[in-house]
Image: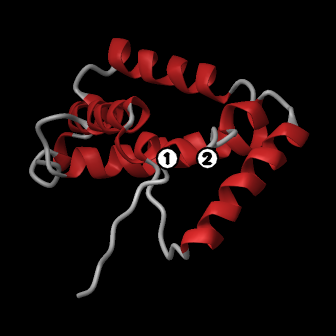
């Protein structure tokens, strides 16, 4: 397997994600064109952006999905991921400027009213599921 790694370093400009979210499409396109030209210059096949791959956002997403589904279970984080990512994507497409606030309220409500997560709530509500949802 022949794999080469490289970094753009100071040549890379801001990804422009936050600028686009603020509605500044023109500046975003300038930044995107500059960064895309670097890919052509160095002939990259794949690009890993460190903030997206290892940032705080991903870490908190993983913790939130475990809490939502039910920490300490095998099925809980899977259910939490499916539900939270579905809700998050739905909110992002419908309410792009309010989705994080609504998403945060949902997570706080789950922590306050369902401290054992979805799996714990399902076990309490439906006793016959206790053996299935371990």
What quarter of the picture does the N terminus occupy?
Answer: bottom left
Q: Are marks 2 and 1 in contact (CB under 8 Å)?
A: yes
Q: Position of residue 27 (x, y in %)?
A: 84, 38
The image's mark for residue 36 is none
Residue 8 appears left or right of 30:
left
Q: Position of residue 18 (x, y in %)?
A: 68, 31
Q: Secondary structure at mark 1?
A: helix
Res. 123 in view: yes
Q: Nearer the viewer, residue 64 or 49?
A: 49
Q: Position of residue 100 (x, y in %)?
A: 60, 26
Residue 51 appears left or right of 69:
right
In which quadrant of the rendered view does residue 72 lie?
top left
Q: CA distance from mark 2 to mark 1?
A: 6 Å
Crowd class of label 1 (few under 14; some 14 to 19; many from 20; radius 10 Å): some
Name the residue at the right extreme: 26
Crowd class of label 2 (few under 14; some 14 to 19; many from 20; radius 10 Å): few
Res. 95 in view: no
Q: Residue sitting at 79 percent across and 42 percent down?
A: 28
The answer to whether 25 is drawn above or below residue 109 in the figure is below
The answer to whether 47 is drawn above or below residue 34 in the figure is below
The answer to whether 133 is drawn above or below residue 105 in the figure is below
Residue behind mark 2: 89
Q: Position of residue 112 (x, y in %)?
A: 35, 11
Q: Residue sitting at 77 percent across and 56 percent down?
A: 33
The answer to whether 16 is drawn above or below residue 34 in the figure is above
Q: Residue sitting at 34 percent across and 49 percent down?
A: 79
Q: Secondary structure at mark 2?
A: helix
Q: Nearer the viewer, residue 29 or 102?
A: 29
Residue behind mark 1: 85
Q: Residue sitting at 43 percent across and 15 percent down?
A: 108
């Amino acid at each position: 397997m022949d794999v080469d790694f490289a970094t753009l370093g100071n040549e890379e400009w801001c990804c422009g994600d936050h600028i686009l979210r603020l509605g500044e499409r023109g500046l975003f396109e300038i930044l995107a064109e500059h960064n895309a030209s670097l890919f052509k210059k160095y002939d990259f096949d794949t690009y890993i952006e460190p903030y997206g791959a290892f940032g705080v956002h991903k870490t908190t997403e993983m913790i939130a999905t475990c809490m939502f589904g039910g920490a300490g279970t095998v099925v809980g984080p899977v259910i939490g991921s499916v539900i939270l990512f579905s809700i998050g994507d739905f909110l992002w497409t419908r309410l792009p400027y309010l989705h994080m606030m609504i998403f945060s309220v949902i997570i706080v409500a789950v922590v306050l009213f369902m401290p054992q997560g979805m799996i714990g709530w399902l076990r309490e509500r439906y006793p016959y599921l206790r053996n299935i949802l371990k």
